[in-house]
Image (cartoon, grey):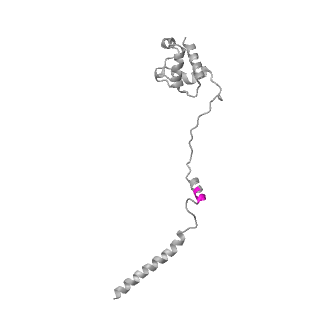
Amino acid sequence: MAEQHSSKGIMWATIVAAVVLMAVVVPFSIRNHGSAADNSKGADDADARIQPVARFELAKAAPAGGGAPKDAATIYNSVCGACHNSGAAGAPKVDDKSAWAARVGQGKEALYKSALNGKNAMPPKGGAADLSDAEIKATVDYILGKVK
């Protein structure tokens, strides 16, 4: 019978210890804060703490000339000359009159169309999509003046 008494005592001691432990722990775990959705200040603090170190935004660059049209020589030297001076990607060199003879024979309109829409490895407008059609046509005229 002594064994029953001691097991009842251990059971009651365990229950009392659990109740006391809960009485101590529960008040510290319950805070007077609202839900996470209601706590806007805490959310702002969290947002500030998890901000990235840097931000990256893509934006179109402003034209270098303040939007003024560029002259044909400048466009040729900065865009077209990269391939047409060296013959890169099969582009006819400006000083090779025989390579241009067949192209010049097609007429200006065909050359304008090739320059505006691209041809073979050359992208439309030579890769300078920010240039106007008039600027491209003026540059084609500039090149024709050099190859004739």
Viewer can see residue 20? yes
Total numbered labels: 0
The answer to whether 39 is drawn above or below residue 106 in the figure is: below
* Residue 69 painted magenta: no
* Residue 42 painted magenta: yes
Q: Residue at (62%, 33%) from the top-left corner?
A: 62
Quarter in which the N terminus is drawn: bottom left
Q: Residue at (49%, 77%) from the top-left corner?
A: 20
The answer to whether 81 is drawn above or below residue 22 in the figure is: above
Kindly indicate the quadrant of the structure image that contains residue 4. bottom left
Q: Residue at (58%, 37%) from the top-left corner?
A: 59
Across and down, in percent, residue 137 comes to: 58, 19
Across and down, in percent, residue 142 comes to: 58, 16
Across and down, in percent, residue 91 comes to: 48, 20
Viewer can see residue 85? no
Outermost residue toward the bottom?
1
Query: Which residues are drawn in magenta?
Result: 39-43
Is 120 situated left or right of 1 in this image? right
Quarter in which the C terminus is drawn: top right
Q: Main secondary structure of the magenta part?
A: helix
Is 10 situated left or right of 122 in this image? left
The answer to whether 29 is drawn above or below residue 14 in the figure is: above
Kindly indicate the quadrant of the structure image that contains residue 144. top right
Is 40 situated left or right of 105 in this image? right
Across and down, in percent, residue 135 comes to: 60, 22
Instruction: Using the image as rendered, state which of residue 121 and residue 94 is in the foreground.
Output: 121
